[in-house]
Amino acid sequence: MASKPGLFTEFPWQKLGSFKYVILAPWVAHSVYSFVSVGEGERDLSNLLIFPLMLSRWAHNQIWISLSRFQTGRSKHKIVHKGIEFEQVDREANWDDQILLSGVFMYLASKYFPGSDHLPFWRTDGIIMVILLHMGPVEFLYYWFHRALHHHYLYTRYHSHHHSSIVTEPITSVVHPFVEIVVYFILFAIPVLSATLAGANSIVATVGYYTFVDFMNNLGHCNFEIVPKSLFHIFPPLKYIAYTPSYHSLHHTQFRTNYALFMPVYDYIYGTVDESSDDLYEISLKGKEEKIHVVHLTHPTTLQSIYHLRLGFASVASQPYASKWYLWLMWPVTWGSMLLTWIFGATFTVEKNTLNNLKMQTWAIPRYSFQYSLSWQRATINSLIEKAILEAEESGVKVISLGLLNQGEELNKNGELYIQKHPKLKIRILDGSTLAVAIVLHSIANGTKQVLLRGNLSKTGFAIALALCHKGIQVKLACRGEFEKLKLHFPAKFGSYLVFSDSLNVEQAWLVGDGLTEEEQRKALKGTRFIPFSQFPPKKVRKDCIYYNTPAMKVPKHLENMHACENWLPRRVMSTGRVAGIVHALEGWDTHECGDKMLDIEKVWKAALNHGFLPLFQP
């Protein structure tokens, strides 16, 4: 909110939350009924298209959000080189309120404003009128209204809410208090309603105008320079009638300059152009290459997880992953994106973070979890991972950590396959297993004498069992096969601490990997602590037990640009793979951690703590 919220800052439907869309239901139902219940010659197509226009505006904004986040994560043309945080994402989560409000006004206008119904599809004179009225009255009135909003009284009560976002995203453009949005809508209604009164409005003019406004708003707040210099060479006056992202970005960093809506001419007329506008445009267009030190290689999990990525839905990505009912409605897009990435996909940048002078990126392999279980996909997936490693090597990256299933033993021997194929690699490959072991060990309460090891045994599980036995803690296994496999490779001196027992209702500390069943969980004692050592969490079926997160750590406060949750983890928490890669680079360790190789557990643990990472749970 604004620093001193004034009257009418909240939208009327704010308390409805996600149910706010029901206010449109009567209008949409009436629109559809009116269209199908009358004769063909009496049908009002312009009224019927109001709701599709709203949907197209929502999709238009979402495309800009994804494009902007993708570009600011990888492009060298970023304008403001700072990150955004969860606070900004939460503040801008209601960006669709302005679309909802415009829909209500459009339905009211269609019903009560003379000449707003039964609009023709095309009127050339109306389109010209809309363009001229925008360039004149709208741009002029907006300029002075905007300057008024920067007066101390209005700024502190209203407009400071918008300016809280110094680093802008496309949706920042429409995040304003309610009364401010109402004034903007009245301004943008001037061309459309004037054309309507003149009997010259049309469907194309209305749809085209609001699409243009959305496009320019998103362009000005996307935080990467996209307007080519050649356009200004071809048509020099363009400098005065169309702004660029860098031009408007200065308004969010300098506050008292570049007030214009889309046409800088009014800033030139009234002397409010920022002197550095041209220089910033040149610098942003030229771009700045940033050296990346650490890459974390992950992949989407479920089909719906594509929306949970930072490039997807901002509000969804800012929360731990959970299946959403409304995402099932988008199954054509979901399956279509999966097929496209399967056929044409290449590794893409998901996120960029900074810790002091260390630059990090997260890359994603365009494959979902279920595809990793397909034996005929392994060669392709390994090829994608190998290509990503070689690209990182060529870019001078110091460390690459393999997340989720990218480090599977059956897939690539925990990453050892790439070392064998490229023994002269300068980049260091990590699977994060040492830190995962350390986190699990420090999640077990002091005084624990016995633990139960369940799920599929992995490199991490084996190392945990060995470390516990070394500390004199008995490790019980309920699976005869896993017990024999572990005992075969266990040092003889620790053999007495490794015990087979088919009883599952004894121990209250369960260390669980993949494959833990619901039936097994139901046999656990009340209050049992399920501590995963796998990168995937077990399904929670017991409300009377405690479920720990998968191995992860809280990030330091000074780690920047954290505004999306990593899969199912809480905010500002990273998986061990990502943390291990960062710590490895900060310490300058010159060794791989893949295959059967493990690092010194306590050394890695203390290094992570020394760099500001903290455990999620205190036993």
Image: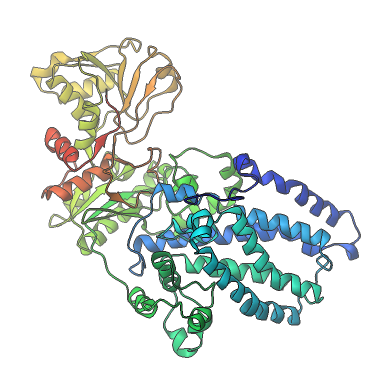
Image quadrant in which the C terminus is located: top left
**286 displayed left or right of 92:** left
Looking at the picture, tell me which residue is in the foreground, 93 or 344: 93
Residue at x 39% of width, y 12% of height: 526
Residue 387 percent location from the top left of the image: 28, 58
**197 displayed left or right of 221:** right
Looking at the picture, tell me which residue is in the foreground, 79 or 407: 79
Counting labels gives 0
* Residue found at the very far front of the displayed protein: 153
Residue at x 54% of width, y 54% of height: 336
Looking at the picture, tell me which residue is in the foreground, 305 or 257: 257
Residue 414 percent location from the top left of the image: 24, 42
As displayed, is residue 282 above or below residue 387?
below
Q: Is residue 202 in sight in this rendering?
A: no
Residue 506 quadrant: top left
Residue 84 percent location from the top left of the image: 38, 54
Q: Is residue 19 in sight in this rendering?
A: yes
Residue 260 percent location from the top left of the image: 52, 73
Residue at x 44% of width, y 62% of height: 68
As displayed, is residue 504 above or below residue 212?
above
As displayed, is residue 532 above or below residue 300?
above
**68 displayed left or right of 11:** left
Q: How is the image coloured?
A: rainbow
Looking at the picture, tell me which residue is in the foreground, 258 or 84: 258
Residue 489 quadrant: top left
Residue at x 38% of width, y 50% of height: 85
